[in-house]
Amino acid sequence: MEAPATDTEGSTEPNPDPAAGDPRLEALAPAVSTGDWHTVIETLGSSESVSALPPALGLIHAIAQKEAEVPISEADRDRTDPTRMAIRSMAALLGVSETSPLALILAKRLLRSNPVSWRKRKAPPIGTSILIVIVGLLLGLAAGYVISVGYVQINLPGLK
């Protein structure tokens, strides 16, 4: 049995996605790396032209819409919903039908929000941080004083 012929990069077939040589992919790289999702949406075009995008670019547009939390009107929901767009694009990339569980699960996993937003939030101002530390120390000192002076007595079994 013969192995399939490969090109210099090791793939057995050329990439069927027409976006592979699309210059917009290179133009999108800086915006994607910085998380500038509004620029990605502007670069790929309006919601009317999204359905004409190649599958890879349609998937990137869906991710950008989801990340930027772009509001969608009820009239445009069928055409521009990022989840539906991602499922269509994923199905086209995988070569399966849009109703395939494989396309559905992979697209939804790709668009799933991860709970990391708390890491992005700024720390409180230095004055607030110092105030929190001072209040904590004062509460600890007050509790220690009350216990040591005898206002609060804790009787432990076996100790007199």
Image (spheres, rainbow, N blue to C red):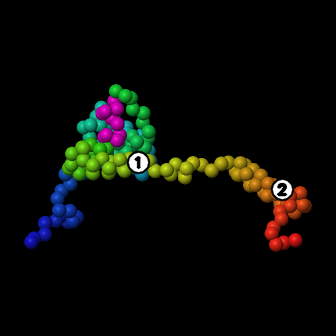
Residue 115 appearing in the image: yes
Give the percent coordinates (x, y) of residue 43: 35, 40
Q: Where is residue 72 shown, x and y percent of the image?
A: 39, 32
Q: Is residue 55 left or right of residue 117?
A: left
Q: Residue under label 2, please give it.
A: 142
Residue occupied by mark 1: 112
* Quadrant of the rendering where the C terminus is positioned: bottom right
Q: CA distance from mark 2 to mark 1?
A: 47 Å
- Left or right, 5 with reference to 74: left
Name the residue: 89% across, 57% down: 151
- Mark 1 or mark 2, which is nearer the start of the sequence? 1
Classify 10 Å Cα crowding around label 1: few (below 14), some (14-19), many (20 and above): few
Residue furthest out toward the top: 75
* Residue 77 on image: x %, y %: 34, 32
Q: Quadrant of residue 89?
A: top left
Please, what secondary structure does the residue beneath circle 1 have? loop
Task: Give residue 99's mark.
Answer: none
Residue type beneath disc 2:
Ala
Tell me whether the residue at label 2 lies in contact with that at label 1, contact meaning CB atoms closer than 8 angstroms: no
Rendering coords of residue 18 (x, y %): 21, 47
For image coordinates 86% across by 58% down, the residue present is 152
| Residue 140, image quadrant | bottom right
Give the main secondary structure of the magenta stretch.
helix
Is residue 19 rendered to the left or right of residue 123? left
* Between 36 and 67, the one nearer to me in the picture: 67
Q: SS at mark 2?
A: helix
Magenta span: 76-85
Residue type at mark 1: give it. Answer: Arg
Residue at position x 55%, y 50% in the image = 118
The residue lying furthest to the front in this view is 157
* Frontmost residue, 71 versus 26: 71
